[in-house]
Image (cartoon, helix red, strand yellow):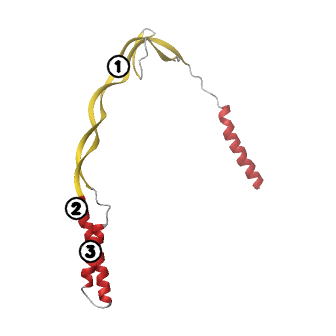
């Protein structure tokens, strides 16, 4: 039974695949010819176009730097010594050792800050800034052509995507009328 179902399904698939090859094509009585072009008028639309334009300018920016002497550690060392001496004056026993260490750290930090303030200076530096701005304008674009042509003694009109020149290809369909 399974074999029979498999055979029927396979036959149906094969028949479906082959049947377009045996399909009868309908006869199309149309043929192609050329007609004389009488007039071609471009169809023009106004289009808004964006043109990017890069603008650059120079601004002055204030920067800060440090000059000479900032490589010396004398202010930090001096501050640590003074801070340790002051810290040593307070407390007794282990508290005195702690106060001395804290005074040395605080004094070194103050010495560092004093050194930076003494050698700090401001200077102006030119910096280039750029920005892209868009300018809009309208342009005329040809979007097609209105074509007037003559075939078989009659005048026809059509719209095409490009200029056909002095002749245009036409599809002629002839069919008997009963």
CA–CA distance between discs 3 and 1?
87 Å
Q: Is residue 22 above or below residue 168?
A: below
Query: Which callout, 2 or 1, points at the residue further toward the start of the chain?
Result: 1
Mark 3 vs 1: CB contact within 8 A: no
- Number of callouts: 3
Q: Determine the residue positioned at 32% across, 80% down.
A: 101
Q: Decide which of 53, 116 is in the foreground and name it.
A: 116
Q: Left or right: 83 with respect to 162?
A: left
CA–CA distance between discs 3 and 2?
16 Å
Tag on residue 107?
3
For label 2, the residue is 118
Local packing at callout 1 (Cα closer than 10 Å; few below 14, some 14-19, many 20+) is: some
Q: Is residue 62 above or below residue 103?
A: above
Q: Determine the residue positioned at 51% across, 14% down.
A: 33
Local packing at callout 3 (Cα closer than 10 Å; few below 14, some 14-19, many 20+) is: many
Query: Which callout, 3 or 2, points at the residue further toward the start of the chain?
Result: 3
């Amino acid at each position: 039974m399974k074999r029979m179902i498999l055979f029927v399904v396979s036959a149906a698939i094969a028949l479906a695949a082959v049947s377009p090859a045996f399909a009868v094509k309908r006869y199309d009585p149309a043929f192609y010819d050329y007609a004389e072009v009488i007039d071609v008028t471009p169809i023009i639309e106004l289009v808004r176009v964006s043109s990017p334009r890069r603008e650059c300018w120079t601004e002055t920016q204030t920067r800060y730097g440090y000059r000479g002497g900032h490589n010396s550690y004398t202010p930090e060392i001096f501050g640590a010594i003074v801070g340790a001496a002051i810290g040593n004056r307070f407390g007794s026993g282990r508290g005195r050792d702690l106060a001395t260490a804290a005074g040395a750290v605080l004094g070194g930090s103050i010495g560092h800050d004093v050194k930076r303030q003494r050698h700090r200076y401001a200077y102006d530096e030119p910096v280039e800034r750029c920005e892209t701005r868009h300018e809009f304008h309208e342009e005329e674009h040809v979007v097609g052509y209105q074509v007037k042509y003559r075939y078989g003694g009659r005048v026809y009109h059509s719209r095409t995507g490009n200029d056909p020149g002095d002749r245009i290809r036409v599809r002629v369909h002839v069919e008997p009328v009963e």
